Structures are given as structure tokens and as C-alpha cells.
Image (cartoon, grey):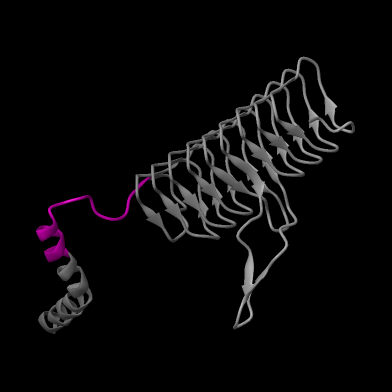
């Protein structure tokens, strides 16, 4: 179904059971796969392709030659709620999402719309399957995110960054250009110098892991004892 107020460029293909809502604008050579939905007032640039069952909410801007794989969702509400002590109240998500040119988003990934401003994905960003990008996140040009990355709200990722599979970024952080974070790492503080960063420990035999876990809990006490010994020796 194509709303009569939608604008379609030349050589546009719309698959079976797809929906193009009111005021949407599709550029030339756009392909909309079967069962996909393009929300009201959304703009899609020339040569973009939505595979089957992609959902693009209202007011989203998609650049040229963008590829969205099946099941991904662009422009859903960000996770915004306020608790009054007894229950949660939903906070309206009034921003949008802007995808630059040549962006590719894998299957079943979600990019949330901003609460006030827009969620911004730069040119040539590559996003793997099952990635979660929260509201008001900014990702710089030519960065790449492997599967199951999760980025909390309002975090800024620089240009030419690479996040390995399963990486988690806490909210309101900044990663400078040229940062690489290895798989399954958790980033809780901003990174201001380019380079490779890791956290956590690799898999090992459970018996060894249990011993190391006990030692980890003792580190603070051990550090204090060492400091006392060093002070005593210095005296």
C-alpha cells in the first residue's frame, strides 16, 4: 500500500504487502522489500534497499545507498521512563534518526529515535546483526559494530572506531576517533586516546576461575597492605 501523498522517485520497487505511509519520500532506484513499512514523513535516499520485513518509523532520514536487512527497526522509541516512586511514566521521544550515506544495518538490529535531538549514524557506518543503539547516540563515519553490541543513550562514538562482538558502552560517554574495543568488553568511562581497549577475562577452567575470583575480591586489601609496607620501609 502506497499512500497517495507519498513521493516516489524513478525506478522504485515496492514489494508485496509493503506499506509507504503519508508524506514519505523515496529517491530514485529505491527497493522496498516485501512486508516492510516506511513511516510517515520519512525520507529515503537514492539507491537505498530495505530487505523484507524492515520497519522504519516516522520522521526518519535515510541516506543514499543504505542497506537495511530483514527485521531491523529504525526509529522506534528510545528507552525513556521516569519513576515516581511507585510506577514508571513514559517520556515522549520527540527526536528522529538520521542515517548517512552507505550505511548498512544487519538483521534484527534496533536504532532508537532521539528523545529531543536525533540519533545520528555517520556515513559508511557498518552495523552487524542484533545490535542495540539507544536514543541520541552518535556514531562517527566509517565505524563498524559487530554483532550484539549495545550502546546506551547519548553516547558518542568517534570516526573509524571498531567495536567487537558483545561490547557494551554505558550512557553519556565519548569515544574519540580510532578506538578499537575487543569483544565482550564493558566500557564505563570515556576514552580520549585512540588505541585498542579490552576488559574482562577470557574463558578458563572453572576451578581456576573460582580461585581468581577469590583473589580479585582480596585485591583492595592487598593493595592497602602493600602501601603500608612501602611506607614503613621508607621510614
Q: Give percent across and percent down for residue 150.
A: 48, 51
Q: Residue 77, relative to residue 39: is it above or below?
A: below
Q: Give the residue displayed 63% in from the left and 68% down from the top.
A: 81
Nearest the eye: 140 or 58: 58
Number of marks: 0
Q: Give percent across and percent down for residue 82.
A: 64, 72
Residue 227 belongs to magenta span: no
Nearest the eye: 190 or 192: 190
Q: The C terminus lies in which quarter of the figure?
A: bottom left
Q: Residue furthest front?
A: 17
Nearest the eye: 43 or 223: 43
Q: Give percent across and percent down for residue 63.
A: 69, 31
Range covered by the magenta-colored residues: 196-212
Image quadrant in which you'd find residue 122: top right
Nearest the eye: 15 or 158: 15
Position of 44 compared to 226: left or right?
right
Residue 202 belongs to magenta span: yes
Position of 149 compared to 12: left or right?
left
Amino acid at each position: 500500500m502506497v499512500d497517495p501523498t507519498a513521493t516516489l522517485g524513478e525506478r522504485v520497487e515496492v514489494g508485496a504487502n509493503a506499506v509507504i505511509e503519508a508524506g514519505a519520500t523515496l529517491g530514485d532506484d529505491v527497493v522496498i522489500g516485501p512486508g516492510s513499512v516506511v513511516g510517515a514523513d520519512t525520507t529515503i535516499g537514492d539507491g537505498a534497499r530495505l530487505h523484507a520485513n524492515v520497519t522504519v518509523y516516522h520522521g526518519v532520514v535515510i541516506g543514499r545507498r543504505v542497506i537495511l536487512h530483514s527485521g531491523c527497526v529504525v526509529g522506534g522509541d528510545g528507552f525513556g521512563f521516569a519513576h515516581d516512586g511507585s510506577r514508571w511514566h513514559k517520556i515522549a521521544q520527540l527526536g528522529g534518526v538520521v542515517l548517512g550515506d552507505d550505511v548498512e544495518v544487519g538483521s534484527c538490529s534496533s536504532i532508537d529515535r532521539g528523545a529531543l535531538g536525533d540519533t545520528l549514524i555517520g556515513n559508511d557506518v557498518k552495523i552487524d546483526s542484533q545490535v542495540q543503539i539507544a536514543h541520541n547516540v552518535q556514531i562517527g563515519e566509517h565505524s563498524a559494530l559487530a554483532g550484539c553490541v549495545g550502546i546506551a543513550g547519548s553516547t558518542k562514538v568517534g570516526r573509524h572506531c571498531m567495536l567487537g562482538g558483545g561490547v557494551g558502552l554505558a550512557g553519556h560517554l565519548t569515544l574519540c576517533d580510532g578506538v578499537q574495543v575487543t569483544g565482550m568488553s564493558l566500557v564505563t568511562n570515556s576514552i580520549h586516546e585512540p588505541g585498542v581497549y579490552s576488559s574482562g577475562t577470557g574463558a578458563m577452567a572453572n576451578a581456576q576461575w573460582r580461585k581468581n575470583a577469590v583473589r580479585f575480591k582480596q585485591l583492595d586489601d592487598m593493595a592497602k597492605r602493600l602501601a603500608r609496607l612501602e611506607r614503613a620501609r621508607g621510614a
